[in-house]
Image (tube, rainbow, N blue to C red):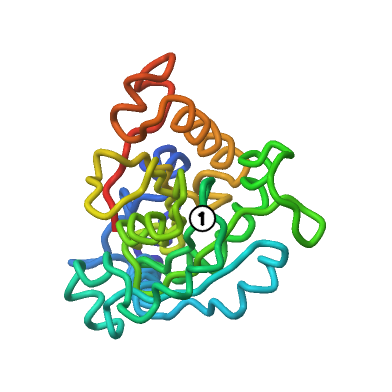
């Protein structure tokens, strides 16, 4: 017996599905979804939950950061449950971790790799993106460590975007880039976002940041394209002394030429 899912009749939704990972026109089997699509949905939901609740193994990232000055800190959220219930704790540095930043060089660009809401995104994409981005940021004039250009990097756990403001302020960074796992969806559980803030300090508003999001090749934005956009924003921020919506308004070409800030995790 051949059910609706196995029907050989043309599927009018097929052309649309070629252009989007969204679940459109999945069909019906009786009163429910076809089993295949139901199982795919449940698997995507499980991947999203895993991405949120798993911890980033920062020790596994460290070999890929050879040559960069590195420090590791925690937010004020004592555990994952508190982090999810109290976003404000994820925006503040743990009271014992300030001294860990003491040895990092200030005055330039600082990178913060933060777990955010997707450990999967950080594990897969943070280092490949950094490898594309650092040469563009330093322009061959940065510090050399381990045979390549380098920038100071902070690994931050239980962290929200705004934690980069306090970290950047303590280090004395001119510009902070927060690479953070974005809130997973049911089409992508491994999307990485990068938030750029000029002159970071505690209390900065989201409107004072720029965001490049949806970095998860091959389905999302690729590393090279993302790195060039971030480097362009960083150059503009340092030249004009601002970031956020003001930077988008000042850059030649205006909002159409630069990405708009997106929602923070």
From where the camera sits, is residue 173 visible?
Answer: yes
Q: Find numbered disc 1 in the image and state the secondary structure of the residue it sits on.
A: strand
Q: Position of residue 158 (x, y in %)?
A: 35, 74
Extreme residue toward the top, this view: 253
Give the image quarter of residue 66: bottom right
Residue with the mark numbered 1: 111
Q: Position of residue 3 (x, y in %)?
A: 36, 65
> Where 230 falls versus 44 (above or below)?
above
Residue at 66% in and 66% down: 65
Does 185 sit left or right of 146 as displayed? left
- State which quarter of the image contains the N terminus: bottom left
> Where 130 falls versus 84 (above or below)?
above
Return the residue nearer the eye: 9 or 112.
112
Residue at 18% in and 66% down: 31
Residue at 48% in and 32% down: 238
Return the residue nearer the eye: 210 or 52.
210
Return the residue nearer the eye: 18 or 236.
236
Does 240 sit left or right of 63 as displayed? left
> Where 3 falls versus 25 (above or below)?
below
Total numbered labels: 1
> Where 80 falls versus 127 (above or below)?
below
Label 1 crowd (10 A; few <14 / some 14-19 / many >=20):
many
Q: Position of residue 198 (x, y in %)?
A: 39, 40
Give the image quarter of residue 38: bottom left
From where the camera sits, is residue 10 visible?
Answer: no
- State which quarter of the image contains the C terminus: bottom left
Give the image quarter of residue 259: top left
Residue at 65% in and 41% down: 138
């Amino acid at each position: 017996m051949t059910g609706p899912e196995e029907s050989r009749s043309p599927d009018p939704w097929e052309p649309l599905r070629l252009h989007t990972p969204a679940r459109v026109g999945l069909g019906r089997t009786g009163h429910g979804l076809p089993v295949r699509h139901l199982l795919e949905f449940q698997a995507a939901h499980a991947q999203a939950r895993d991405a949120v609740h798993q911890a980033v193994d920062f020790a596994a990232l460290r070999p890929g950061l050879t040559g960069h000055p590195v420090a590791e800190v925690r937010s004020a959220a004592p555990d994952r449950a508190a982090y999810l219930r109290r976003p404000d704790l994820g925006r503040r540095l743990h009271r014992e971790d300030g001294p860990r930043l003491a040895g990092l060089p200030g005055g330039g660009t600082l990178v913060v790799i933060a777990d955010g809401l997707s450990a999967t995104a950080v594990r897969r994409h943070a280092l490949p993106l950094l490898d594309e981005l650092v040469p563009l940021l330093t322009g061959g004039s940065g510090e050399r460590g381990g045979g390549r250009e380098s920038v100071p990097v902070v690994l931050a756990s239980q962290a929200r975007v705004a934690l980069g403001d306090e970290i950047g302020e303590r280090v004395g960074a001119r510009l902070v880039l927060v690479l953070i796992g974005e809130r997973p969806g049911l089409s992508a559980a491994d999307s990485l976002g990068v938030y750029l803030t000029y002159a970071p300090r505690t209390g900065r508003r989201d409107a004072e940041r720029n965001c490049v999001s949806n970095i998860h090749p091959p389905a999302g934005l690729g590393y090279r394209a993302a790195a060039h956009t971030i480097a362009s924003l960083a150059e503009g921020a340092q030249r004009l002394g601002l970031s956020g919506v003001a930077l988008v308004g000042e850059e030649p070409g205006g909002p159409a030429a630069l990405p708009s800030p997106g929602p923070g995790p």
